[in-house]
Image (cartoon, rainbow, N blue to C red):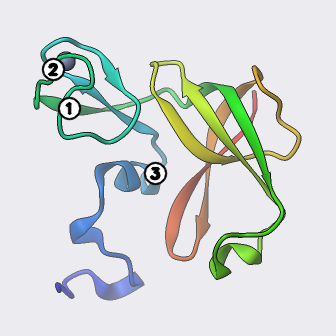
C-alpha cells in the first residue's frame, strides 16, 4: 500500500477516474473510441461493440431523473448522519446513467444539474433541480 498521498486519507494513487472527476467537480463517463457509444457504467469493454478502447469524457452535468429512491435507513454507518436522503438514477444528457444523491422531492423526468458534496473523505455527486 502506498502512502505517498496520505495527507487527507484518500487513496489518490488508486482513485478511479470517475471518483477523481467528482473530486475535481466533474461528472465523467466513458465513450467507445471505436463506435462512439457512451457507456453507462465503468467498463473494460464497450457494451455495444466489445472494443476495449474506452476513453473518459467530462459530462455537462445536466441530466434527467430516471428513478428516485428515498433512503430512510442508511445502509452503512457513514450515511446514517445524513439520512433520510434521496438517491436518483439520472440519465446524463450525454446518454449514460449515473447513481447519485439528489435534492429531496425531485421527481422522475425532472431536469437536474450536478453539484458535489464532501462525505467521509470522498466527493459525491448530488443533483439539484435545474
Ligand atoms: Zn464500441
> In front here: 45 or 112?
45
Residue depth check, mark 3 versus mark 1: number of the one nearer the observer: 1
Q: CA distance from mark 1 to mark 2?
A: 7 Å
Q: Earlier in the sequence, mark 2 or mark 3?
A: 3
Residue 32 appears left or right of 101: left
- Residue at disc 3, secondary structure: helix
Q: Quadrant of residue 26?
A: top left
Tell me the quarter of the image containing the C terminus: top right
Which callout, 2 or 3, points to the residue nearer the camera?
2
Is residue 16 placed above or below 99 in the rendered structure? below
CA separation in Å, label 2 and label 3: 22 Å
Label 2 crowd bin: few (<14), some (14–19), many (20+), radius 10 Å: some
Q: Where in the image, quadrant-wise, is ligand 1 located? A: top left
> Which numbered disc covers residue 55?
1
Callout 3: few (<14), some (14-19), or many (20+) C-alpha neighbours within 10 Å? many
Q: Residue furthest right?
A: 105
**Residue 70 picture location, percent across and down:** 81, 51
Residue at 31% across, 75% down:
11
Q: Earlier in the sequence, mark 1 or mark 2?
A: 2
> Circle 3 is placed at which residue position?
22
State the SS at label 1: strand
> Considering depth in this image, is 60 or 99 the residue closer to the camera?
99
Residue wearing tag 2? 33
Amino acid at each position: 500500500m502506498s502512502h505517498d498521498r496520505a495527507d487527507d486519507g484518500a487513496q489518490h494513487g488508486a482513485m478511479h477516474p470517475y471518483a477523481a472527476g467528482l473530486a475535481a467537480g466533474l461528472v465523467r463517463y466513458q465513450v467507445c473510441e471505436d463506435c462512439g457509444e457512451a457507456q453507462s457504467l465503468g467498463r473494460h469493454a464497450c457494451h455495444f461493440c466489445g472494443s476495449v478502447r474506452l476513453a473518459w469524457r467530462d459530462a455537462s452535468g445536466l441530466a434527467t431523473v430516471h428513478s428516485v429512491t428515498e433512503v430512510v435507513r442508511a445502509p452503512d454507518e457513514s450515511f446514517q448522519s445524513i439520512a433520510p436522503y434521496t438517491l436518483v438514477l439520472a440519465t446524463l444528457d450525454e446518454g449514460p446513467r449515473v447513481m447519485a444523491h439528489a435534492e429531496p422531492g425531485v421527481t422522475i423526468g425532472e431536469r437536474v444539474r450536478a453539484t458535489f458534496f464532501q462525505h467521509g473523505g470522498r466527493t459525491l455527486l448530488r443533483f439539484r433541480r435545474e
